[in-house]
Amino acid sequence: DQQVKQNSPSLSVQEGRISILNCDYTNSMFDYFLWYKKYPAEGPTFLISISSIKDKNEDGRFTVFLNKSAKHLSLHIVPSQPGDSAVYFCAAWSGANSKLTFGKGITLSVRP
Amino acid sequence: DVKVTQSSRYLVKRTGEKVFLECVQDMDHENMFWYRQDPGLGLRLIYFSYDVKMKEKGDIPEGYSVSREKKERFSLILESASTNQTSMYLCASSDPLGGTREQYFGPGTRLTVT
């Protein structure tokens, strides 16, 4: 039973355009949502998070939007750069056990 | 600067061997985690620990055990390695009161079991 879903395995975007990465979840008890970026042969690095009581959080080129009624969040990267090419994981945090539940990831390719 | 280190970047072991993966964090975090990452499956939680001597099973604990004798160190043990345990293993730590709920990851150990 997958509680965090990233339904698209890959996304290709032109440099300078917007990248929109989507994530859906099923458990309404999640308190925080996080996005991680991962390059091959490296550990994931934290990008941005959002509390379940907010609907938007912005940090530089990265913005996360949360739609609680739809149990959906998205990460917007504007403008996209070739260095953004990586695997992006959506994760949800539960206060009940301090655990993160990860999606399967999406591979973003930014074309020069 | 926050740091999580793992004992090996690459490891090759034979079927049936006992394998130890070590993880050390220097942030005085109480929580530590072991994950494995496989293509198309994302990150799956194997075991985690909230404190010294404490451990909890994650989603896929079969074939693994852990040890946490000191706060900064969390070890993953494969009692008898099998080929289906070939994977990327990632250790992470977190502060339970951290504002962003972030887990800090090590660089990973790519384990191949032949």
Image (spheres, coloured by chain):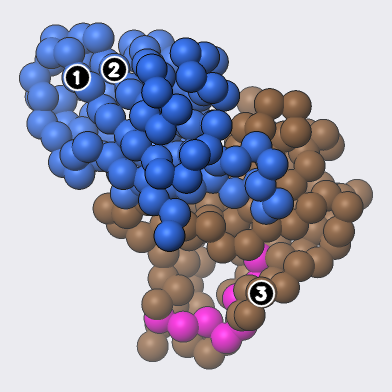
Chain colours: A brown, B blue
Q: Circle 1 sits on which residue?
A: B19
Q: Residue at x 69, y 41 (%)?
A: B97
Proximity of marks 2 and 1: CB atoms separated by less than 8 Å: yes
Q: Circle 3 sits on which residue?
A: A59
Q: Kindly identify the amino acid type of the residue bearing the numbered disc 3.
A: Asp
Q: Kindly identify the amino acid type of the residue bearing the numbered disc 2.
A: Ile
Image quadrant of residue B26?
top left
Give the distance between the C-alpha atoms of the residues marked 2 and 1, in whole angstroms. Answer: 6 Å
Q: Circle 2 sits on which residue?
A: B77
Give above or below for B85 relative to A63. Answer: above
At numbered mark 2, what does the secondary structure look like: helix, strand or loop? strand
Q: Kindly identify the amino acid type of the residue bearing the numbered disc 1.
A: Val
* Percent position of residue A7, x then y: 60, 49
Q: Residue at x 59, y 56 (%)?
A: A35
* Percent position of residue B90, x then y: 37, 39
At numbered mark 3, what does the secondary structure look like: helix, strand or loop? strand
Q: Which residues are magenta?
A: A75-82
Q: Residues within 10 Å of mark 3 (few under 14, many from 20)?
A: few
Q: Residue at x 33, y 22 (%)?
A: B76
